Image: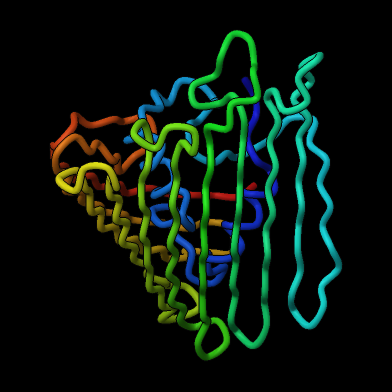
Amino acid sequence: MDRNARSHQRQTRGGVQSRACRAQAVDSILTAWLGLNQVAGWPGTNTNVPIGALYDSNALVYPSPKFYGASVALEYAPGGVPGQIQGGTRESAVLRYSNYGLNLSAVYYNAHDTNLATAAPTGLDNNRFYYFGAKYTFRGVSASASASYGIGKNPSNTNLADYEMISGGLGYQFTPFLKVTSGFYYLKDRNHSANHSSEYVMGAEYGLSKRTTVYAQVGYVANRGTMNQTITYGQPVAPGVSTTATMIGLRHSF
């Protein structure tokens, strides 16, 4: 089922990501959001995630003009289910503010018949995600700090899914060629306090030329209880197991 919230992904990433201090290891809240869905039971083999979304097919989106740095985006995706007005529907609202080095984002996302998808949609409200993110850039583009908070749950049965997400990051551009970023991601099962996870990541990039960059990344995640937050997408870990990952690479733009 290809139903992921386009406005959610575009707007939230814009709220917490520093363009000047970005690294693949800490690309906005995407790392924590994927981990949130992993611990909620998402296998990673389909696009029907239990919490939030990345894209919504056939969605109607209204992006407002900016007013003193503030804007709003509204989305509604019809479910296309005959005789069931709420069957398979999605709706979201995104508020943004960007001015004087400060970026703020607030997101509300709600979906029906997604967690898990039913053979015959009934309009069950079972996917809800709240998010708030902030980023402040100091000295133009040389340094930035970000923080975010989110809650993902199944509103029709919070015993199945009710999670809290906290993330933060720091980045600094030492020279026009070298920048370093870091991130922290914390997940907690609000139904069972023994289930929680902390992930720490750091990345560095060095520009060899205008089109060639070398990068290095390292991450560590401490999972407790039944938590199985991952470091690398597509590389799941066993519940309650801590792990470390490193990566060194070269990126060239043609």
Q: Could you tell whether 215 is left or right of 118 in the image?
A: left
Seen as rendered, the residue at the extreme top is: 119
Question: Between residues 229 and 153, which one lies in front from this camera angle?
Answer: 153
Report the residue at 70% width, 23% height from top: 87
The foreground one among 127 and 242 is: 127
Task: Examine the image and state in which quarter residue 167 appears.
Answer: bottom left
Q: Position of residue 107 (x, y in %)?
A: 60, 57
Tally of numbered tags: 0
Residue 27 lies, in percent from the top left, at 47, 55
Does 140 appear above or below 70?
below
In the image: residue 204, left or right of residue 252: left
Residue drawn at x 49%, y 83% is 142
In the shown orientation, is residue 95 left or right of residue 16?
right
Looking at the picture, the colour scheme in use is rainbow
Q: Position of residue 119 (x, y in %)?
A: 59, 8
Instruction: Left or right? Give the position of 54 relative to 149.
Output: right
Give the quadrant of the N terminus.
top right
Q: Residue at x 82, y 57 (%)?
A: 63
Q: Position of residue 154 (x, y in %)?
A: 46, 36
- Camera-side residue: 114 or 96? 114
Q: Is residue 90 above or below residue 173?
A: above
Q: Residue at x 67, y 74 (%)?
A: 97
